[in-house]
Image (spheres, grey):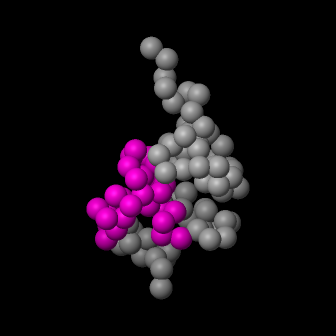
Amino acid sequence: MKNPGIDMKLRDLKGFGIKSEESLAQVGINSVEDFMKIDPFELYAKLKGKVKGTGLNSIYAIIGAKEGLHWQEVARTQKTAILMRLDDMGLAPK
């Protein structure tokens, strides 16, 4: 059976679109395979340093795309854990 992810574009992932794809390309993520390999928090840190407008919704969207969930579901169910991890990394919002 053919791997369904093989022909997928980043914009095909849940919650992503062309803008997400363009932002990810700025930090060297150009394929679904590359995206799935990188830790979501490491990716968020890269985006935060390079892409203007990267905020909390971005980490929710990254995790949602990896887990096949809507970003709002991730925000609702994982917000505290995400904020604690971002705080540990020095990336939590002030």
**Which sits in the foreground, 1 or 12?**
12
Q: Residue at x 68, y 66 (%)?
A: 50
Residue 82 image offset from top left, x and y in percent: 37, 66
* Residue 58 forms part of the magenta stretch: yes
Q: Residue at x 52, y 63 (%)?
A: 58
Q: Residue at x 42, y 58 (%)?
A: 71
Residue 87 occupies quadrant: bottom left
Secondary structure, magenta segment, majority class: helix
From which residue to which does the magenta span run?
55-81
* Residue 50 visible in the current orientation: yes
Q: Residue at x 48, y 69 (%)?
A: 56
88 on left or right of 77? right
Q: Residue furthest bottom?
A: 94
65 on left or right of 49? left
Residue 57 image offset from top left, x and y in percent: 48, 66
Vertical comparison of 73 with 14: above or below: below
Residue 81 image offset from top left, x and y in percent: 32, 67
Residue 17 image offset from top left, x and y in percent: 59, 49
Residue 88 occupies quadrant: bottom left
